[in-house]
Amino acid sequence: MSSDDTTTAGAPSLHPRDEMTPCPWQRGVHVWHVPIFTRAFVFFLALSIIGVGLSVVRAFGGLDFTGMNDAYAWGIWKTFNVMTLTALGSGGFAIGIAAWVFGRHELHAVMRTALMTSLVFYLAGLLALTVDVGRPWNMWHLAFPSHWNTDSSLLEVAVCMPLYAVIFLAFENLPPVFERIFVHASDNLRAVMVRTMPIIKAIFPYMLAGAYVLPAMHQSSLGALLLLAGEKLDPLWQSQMLPLLYVIQAGVAGVACVMFTLMIASLYWQRPIDTRVLGSLGRLMSQCAMAFLIIRFADLAWRGVLGRALALDGLALVFHAENLLVGLPALVMFRRDWRERPRVLFVSAIFAGIGAMLYRFVPTTIAFVPGELKFYFPTFLELLMSAGYVALTVVLYSVAVKMLAIVPGSLDQWYGAVAYARRRFRTIRVDEHGQPSRH
Amino acid sequence: MNVDRRQALQAMLGGTAGGVALLTPAEAAASPIDDRDALGMLYDATRCTGCKACVTACTAANDLVPDTVLSNGRWQMPTDLNAQTKNIIKLYEAPDSPTHSFVKRQCMHCVEPACVTGCPFGALTKRPEDGVVAWHASLCIGCRYCEIACPFEVPKFDWANFNPQVVKCELCRHRFAEGGGPACTEVCPTGAVIAGNRADLLADAKRRIAAHPGQYFEDRVYGEHEAGGTQVLYLSHVSFAALGLPTLSDESLAHYGTKVHHVLYRYLAIPLALWALMAGIIRSRFKHHEKKARVEEASTGLPPQL
């Protein structure tokens, strides 16, 4: 793609005001004109049904079909679906803080994408966590704070993660849902919603602040889990800085995931790309990655294990791969002119995303070396379930963007979507701008 | 001490709007058990003949099904601690000399156990009266964090069972009421493993080292300081590492893993302060954001999107 056909909207403007705005990404627009059930969607749906179906079957049997053993007691569901994929789902957290706390206003354009990707990854992660638990009938203790062991980082994760996903992330994702309901709603329902809106707006800042504190807590606690692994974890990773580095890498992975999702969605559904916003995301990603590298190397030097990094063994190579995969994109994204090139942005997001995911995956797997020599590799069914949860995120996301105004688009697209909806759905009650109206 | 360590930690106050509960300070938690109350064992590898009477006694006393996989169902022959084996005797043979040693492995009953710290709902507890690290089925969700945390890799998970148990030595605590002690110590013919309180056992071990200079590895007791100290102590004529006992620092993992956590989460003060700070900033930005949206709506006619 050349920069010409990506930075301009392409199609002639449907509305005169469009020409005044330099930024193609002006508002969330439904993915319209595309059916929900496409061939790719059916594939992902089938895979997710298999994954969720096997989870139900798992509820009636033990964990014996997995490859997990007493040395590697945490398998791929915890290490990949929870540890790694909730990092990818931290876009809403990282971009939210950047926009609302640090005032990067341009990022509001991609907030809905960030929040929806976060929600789907967290929901899939929670499902994986539930399936992984060996004695789920005792989970009721979670509801009673007097039963909590507050020393435990796992308790913090178990309390904080569902609380964040089910209450805070769900709340943050309400506005597009409300918009959709409102345009179809009866007058009575509209009256109720009109009365509800002020309440939502009144608690909005406080809920947002909660939605940034909670991920900071549980994403760091995911790192803190590994502190108790002590000497089993290689000294390149075992550090009191693990919790902090885990949060920062959640930021890198989350922003990278949002950049990737936005660009794939724009390519797939022929949306213009707003390199100004993507460049800003790239800069945010770069800043997080730089913070990660500086803290990591300062910590290694402080603990006196920098020499360990020079060893030419497999683990040291993994360590270098982690650093290079986030470090190179971070350097590239430092340059303003490179931040404006879609191809560079896309490749950088993929590299940094993989690097951050690798860092979040390695301490529980490759760098986790128990004394008891055993081998763990997930069984086929275990992998199938894991893939099913990933497919579930794709399914939920693609349904969401076709039902709700999430993917950022230009005013062209907005008017196109409104005009289409007004023709296609006779019950819809909006004017030509998309304003809810009475008919 | 009549308050359970876990209970002491837990007095939770009511939730705030976010459903966040306030935590009690960490100091309330750890008051270590006196060495004279702490029940433990002393295993002296120089006295062990490898008869494995302790292994069968353990299996019988704990109603375990003997692991006979390796012997094709003929006799008990576990290869390691597992869901059917809470106690095992292993043999170490030096590669290039006739030196050999047996080693008995079971739960070490750490003074500050990492498994108890990690266990989310306190299914593993350090009993205040005798320091036994005990497992409670009704509180365990089967997360297996204890297996990740234990530096000795002792807790084993019952993978094949629909109702999986966490299996580990509990010093035969179910026999205490009838005046019994750890079954393994009662059957040992040579006194290689004996039960007692940690203070006496440690003194005994040091007497043996003093009486036989040069006989014991590094003239020291394994478990005196390792991982913050353990209630099961080891004497050996070969290196502890050769026996599969890990080389550990003196700081307990429970302390290493929670010292920052305890500062960050004390009274939840830091998270709440952070929340209040961000809520203040976001509130002013949100007002501005709303105003801008209203102006835009008036000029373009487009519905505002939050």
Image: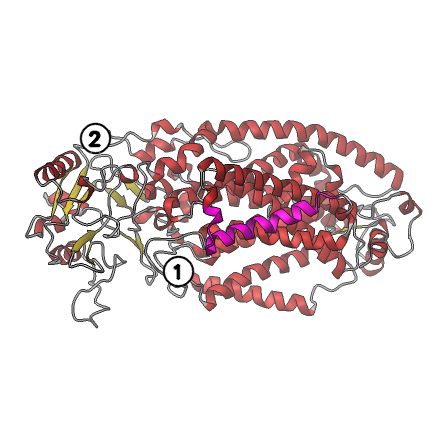
**Subunit under mark 2:** B
Give left or right: position of B118 versus B241: right
* Residue depicted at x 71% and y 33%: A103
**Subunit under mark 1:** A
Q: Residue furthest left?
A: B189
- Label 2: state its secondary structure: loop
Task: Give percent across and percent down for residue A131.
Answer: 45, 57
Q: Which residue is mark 2?
A: B34
Query: Residue B87 or A35: which is nearer the viewer?
Result: B87
Residue A266 is a magenta residue: no
- Looking at numbered disc 2 in the image, what kind of residue is underneath it? Asp
Give the residues drawn in magenta, as a range: A308-335
Main secondary structure of the magenta stretch: helix
Q: Is residue A165 above or below residue A54?
A: above
* Number of marks drawn: 2
Give left or right: position of B129 versus A239: left
Q: Which residue is mark 1?
A: A68
